[in-house]
Amino acid sequence: MRDHVMHYGSFARTALLTAALCSSLGAQARCSIETVRGVWVETTGVGTAMVAAPGSAQPVPAPVTALGMYSIDEQGRLTGWFNIMLAGNYSDATIAGRVAVNSNCTGTIRFTVTPLGAPGPLPGEGAFRILVLDNGNEIRAMSVADFPMKYTGVETHRRIVRNSQAEPSCTAETVRGTYGTAAEGIILKAVPGQTQPVPAPYSGIGAIAIDGEGGITGGSTASIAGELMESELADASLQVLPDCTGHISYRLRPKGAPAALPGGISKVVILDNGDEIRALEIQLPMGIGMPLLPSVSKRISKEPGPVGW
């Protein structure tokens, strides 16, 4: 009897060990191009680029941030566009390249860049090392090439459509509702006695209501180099394009000011059926400075307001 019990115990331990090993093997990452096929939104925080500067023999650091969209097809071909703010200067371009994905969910993206209006791509090729996360719904990317510039920063890419042949589809009604917003970055401000704008750290939170026809109301609290500013939106509107991109134009009225400051413009991409809006400020209202301000707005309710801030 004892021999039978010992034999049964040994068999049970072997069976448990085999099951655990099989479970571990089954849980290992398995990725391919099919895992990442679809339409993606590229967002960055504020990174650092090394750029040529007048009067300097060596490249100097400059803040940079970007927002873009691209698709990956079943053969790993990549096409898309991006908006970039480099040291407060705005530009946009198209990209084309290839994606390679390893079975362990690492990989590379290699691409060329064609500035808007240019006859062809810039000479050279960019390269990112990537990690594929969340069953192919997220990519983290870091530049490993000196093209189009030496760049330090980690990007987050989110998939918004699984089929690379399908287009995102949005209308003004897609973003109807009340949103909480947050932004962190840098504002380049003119300072008396300085020949170049000086970077001032920025953070801000707020709430907005979008009425389903593109009208926006709301307010925010911002800190610019530690100085607080309470403000509300004036004459703000969101134009939504069918491909889930668009732009916000607005004036900003600091609380207590006699008039609103004109001139604010943000480029936006809409994610998750309107539950999230990613934005890149490309022009601040008059007199505030030059922006490097990516922001995220998340929907609190599908009912638009009222917003008291």
Image (cartoon, helix red, strand yellow):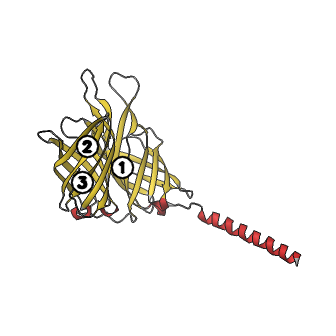
Q: Badge 1 local density, few (<14 within 10 Å), some, or many (20+)?
A: many
Secondary structure beneath dot 3 equals strand
Tell me the amino acid under the disc marked 3: Ile
Residue 195 at least partly seen: yes
Residue 188's x, y, as percent?
29, 33
Q: Which residue is mark 2?
A: 282
Where on the picture, by quarter, is residue 150?
Answer: top left
Q: Nearer the viewer, residue 109 or 208?
A: 208
Q: Nearer the viewer, residue 183 or 137?
A: 183
Residue 262's x, y, as percent?
15, 42
Residue ID at (25%, 61%): 177
* Above or below, 209 relative to 152: below
Secondary structure beneath dot 1 equals strand
- Give the total number of marks visible in the rendering: 3
Measure the alpha-carbon separation of dots 1 and 3: 33 Å
Q: Which residue is mark 1?
A: 95
Q: Earlier in the sequence, mark 3 or mark 2?
A: 3
Q: Which residue is mark 3?
A: 208
Q: Which one is in front in this view, the residue at disc 1 or the one at disc 3?
A: 3
Q: Earlier in the sequence, mark 1 or mark 3?
A: 1
Where on the picture, by quarter, is residue 71?
Answer: bottom left
Measure the alpha-carbon separation of dots 3 and 2: 19 Å
Q: Which one is in front in this view, the residue at disc 1 or the one at disc 2?
A: 2
Quadrant where the image shows the N terminus? bottom right
Tell me the amino acid under the disc marked 2: Ile
Q: Badge 3 local density, few (<14 within 10 Å), some, or many (20+)?
A: many
